[in-house]
Amino acid sequence: MSHEDSRTGDEVGVRAVIEAMAAAVRAKDVEAMLSLCTPDVATFDLVPPLAHEGAEAVRRIWSRALAGFVPPLEYDVHRLEVFVDGDVAFTRSLTRFGGAKEDGERSASWLRSTLGLRRIDGHWKVAHEHVSVPFDMESGKALLDLTL
């Protein structure tokens, strides 16, 4: 297999993890999400504290974040770029996240997402996630209603 063929196969594998992650979010399946992560996964997410480390911390924040939504949730990955070098990869994308809430309201916003992945025993796993939203520098408020 040539280096280019390997890179293409690696990119396909990473993209499959991203799609499986999206499917798990849409289904509110936190355990399926965690199965795609390393045990020591770290996230820099929208909710405090500044960093969440380990599967249990990620389980808590995702369980809380998804609790108010009625499945299926909206979780669509746009402009996904994949970069692979050996057993390490990272992705960047814009993601539309939201859906119907249990109280009948609808909520959705655009997020900026960067993932770091490692190949472990032949499988790509998410080792790091960084999610952010732009904010207005004058008011300090998050800008959740932006569109592509």
Image: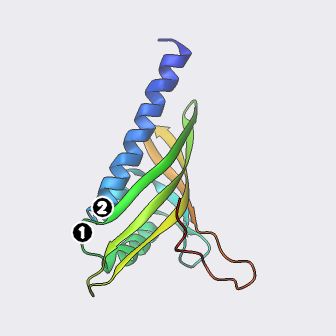
Q: Secondary structure at mark 2?
A: helix
> In this orientation, which residue lies closer to the viewer: 98 or 52?
98
Residues at marks 2 and 1 touching, judged by CB atoms closer than 8 Å: yes
Task: Residue 70: give x, y in percent of width and height.
Answer: 25, 74
Residue 118, how many percent across, how many down?
Answer: 52, 42
Seen from the viewer's position, the closer of residues 80 and 119 is 80
Nearer to me, 2 or 93? 93
Q: Amino acid at mark 1?
A: Pro
Q: Is residue 104 visible?
A: yes
Label of residue 79 in the image: none
Q: Taking 45 as reference, is 77 above or below it?
A: above
Answer with mark 2 or mark 1, whichever residue precedes in sequence: 2
Q: Which residue appears at 54% of the width and 41% of the height?
A: 81
Q: Residue at x 30, y 80 (%)?
A: 101
**How far across and how far down the image is residue 145, in percent?**
52, 73
Q: In what element is the residue under mark 1?
A: loop
Up/down of 147 relative to 125, above or below: below
What's the amino acid at mark 2? Arg
Residue with the mark numbered 1: 71
How far from the left and from the top, in percent, is residue 39?
A: 44, 55
Q: Relative to the observer, which residue lies in front, 112 or 63?
A: 112
Placement of 103 over or under 85, stated as above or below: below
Q: Which residue does the numbered mark 2 point to in the structure image?
A: 26
Residue at 55% of width from left, 73% of height from top?
Answer: 46
